[in-house]
Amino acid sequence: MKLQPGNHVLYIPNHANGDRNHPDCEEGFITSIKKLWGRKEFAWCRYWSRIDPTRLRTTSCSEMTPMQNLVKLEDGPAWLPFQCMNCNGSGFVSHYTYDGDDFVGAKDCPVCHGNGRLVVYRHDHLAYWPGGPFAGKLDGKYASELIEYETTKRTVKALAAPPA
């Protein structure tokens, strides 16, 4: 199966000789894939910290990784997008005066920063975008979004199937 952004992967370094249990293997996810030098594909990945597996090891950028060193893990995507529950996906909330009497207008949602969407990682951490800054934690959110994701995937597959 071809690797793509969002896949949950295991990095196996060359010196591990394919051993998935080697202590230097790292779990992470793909943020993008690019072809360099006209032919060779590389994945840019973010990896989870070995010290605290609920946190990313790097917080500012992805790391270039050779595709042949990555193995896809089959237990769901590394992150899932979902609609912001504060603004219902619009990116805006109503803004009133300090005393709450007069409507001033719309302002950017303080939860999603005007994006209308957030992403949830496998450890229930929320972020503003894949690989972006964390926006808190919501226990059980990944599991609930995974159910919706799988249901939507099955529905789309059924709708795309040729009529019998």
Image (spheres, rainbow, N blue to C red):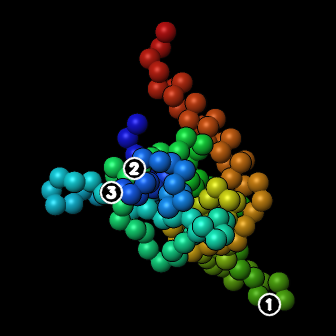
Q: Is residue 125 above or below residue 40?
A: below
Residue under label 1, please give it: 98
Precedes in sequence: disc 2 or disc 1:
2
In front here: 76 or 108? 76
Mark 2 and mark 3 in contact? Answer it, CB < 8 Å. no
- Crowdedness near tag 2: few (<14), some (14–19) or many (≥20) residues, C-alpha within 10 Å: few
Residue at x 42%, y 47% (from the top left corner):
18
- Circle 3 sits in a helix, a strand or a loop, which is it? strand
Q: Is residue 112 visible?
A: no
- The span from disc 2 to disc 3 (Cα, nearest Å) is 15 Å
Where 128 sits versus 95, above or below? above
Instruction: Give residue 124's position: percent from left, percent from top.
Output: 70, 60
Determine which residue is flagged by label 3.
66
- Whole-percent x and y of residue 10? 49, 52
- Which label belongs to residue 4? none
State the residue at coordinates (59%, 44%). 76
